[in-house]
Image (cartoon, rainbow, N blue to C red):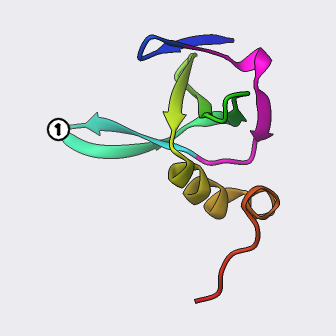
């Protein structure tokens, strides 16, 4: 699947699939209030250039979102700790 975000092309067929266990909530509005909806079929990818890309389903469409490394770490800590430890090392005890 190909996405164009900020004039950059992201082709998931050419990326490394990192995790399908991530849980992503996207913002929305209901009755004039901000709410958070759970996305379906969330997948986290890493490009050959080291960028992070998330895809998720909302309604009947698939959307893409570019993530920072800090966002990826937070996402993996919450939903795929084994993959986090594989990619970034073990969590530091504080």
Instruction: Point out the stretch of residues depicted in magenta.
Output: 9-23
* Residue under the point 54% across and 24% down: 64
User: Which residue occupies the extreme front position in the image?
Assistant: 49
Q: Tell me what residue is drawn at x 82 percent, y 59 percent.
A: 86
Q: Element type at marker 1?
A: loop
Q: Position of residue 38 (x, y in %)?
A: 52, 43
Picture quarter with the C terminus: bottom right
Whole-percent x, y for residue 71 in the image: 51, 51
Instruction: Quadrant for residue 10, please give it.
Output: top right
Q: Is residue 81 magenta?
A: no
Number of numbered discs on residues:
1
Viewer-closest of 81 and 88: 88
Q: Looking at the rendering, which quadrant does residue 40 occupy?
A: top right
- Asked whether 10 falls inside the magenta stretch, the response is yes
* Position of residue 83 in the picture relative to residue 91 (left or right): right
Q: Position of residue 33 (x, y in %)?
A: 21, 44
Query: Dot 1 corresponds to which residue?
Result: 32
Q: Is residue 84 above or below residue 24?
A: below
Seen from this angle, which residue lies furthest left? 32
């Amino acid at each position: 699947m190909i996405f164009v975000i900020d004039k950059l092309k992201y082709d998931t067929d050419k990326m490394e699939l990192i995790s399908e266990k991530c849980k992503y909530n996207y913002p929305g509005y209901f009755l004039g209030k901000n709410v958070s909806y759970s996305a379906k079929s969330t997948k986290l990818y890493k490009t050959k250039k080291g960028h992070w890309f998330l895809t998720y389903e909302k309604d009947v469409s698939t959307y893409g979102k570019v993530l920072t490394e800090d966002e990826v770490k937070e996402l993996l800590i919450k939903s795929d700790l084994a993959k986090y430890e594989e990619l970034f090392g073990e969590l530091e005890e504080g």
